[in-house]
Image (spheres, grey):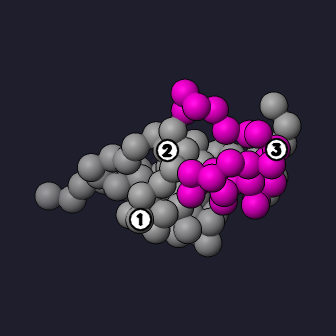
Amino acid sequence: MPRPNKDDVERLSRGQPTRAKIGSRSVGHRLTQKERILFEAAQRNGFLKVPVTGIRPNVLNVYRLWCEAECRPFIVKGETELS
């Protein structure tokens, strides 16, 4: 698979076709509005924070591709529920 670029990852996250054909029909990539907020925060912070309730794998797939495009480490942190 070719190395993705940021534009292709953004198009993939919106459900649009990519120029480099980096997506797969068997793997989810389209993000909802709430997932997009998590993804954009991950881009700013340098890591993806997974909420207690969990997320669909789509966010992980898109963030992993974005990290590959940026040559950054793929870091995912889980929130802990405080009682």
Magenta highlight: main SS:
loop
Residue 70 position, x and y percent, is: 79, 57
> Where is the N terminus found, in terms of image quarters?
top right
The numbered mark, 2 or 1, whose residue comes first in the sequence reads 1
Question: Tag 1, which secondary structure?
Answer: helix
Distance from the alpha carbon under mark 3 to that under mark 2: 19 Å
Instruction: Name the residue located 41 percent from the left edge and 65 percent from the top edge.
Output: 33
Question: Is the Cβ of the residue at disc 3 closer than 8 Å to that at disc 2?
Answer: no
Which residue in the protein does label 1 denote? 33
In this view, which residue lies farthest toward the top? 26
Is 12 magenta? The answer is: yes
Which residue in the protein does label 2 denote? 58
Pick whichever, 4 or 55, lies toward us: 4
Residue 41 position, x and y percent, is: 53, 69
Amino acid type, callout 3:
Ala
Dot 1, crowdedness within 10 Å: few (<14), some or many (≥20)?
few
Amino acid type, callout 2:
Asn
Which residue in the protein does label 3 denote? 20
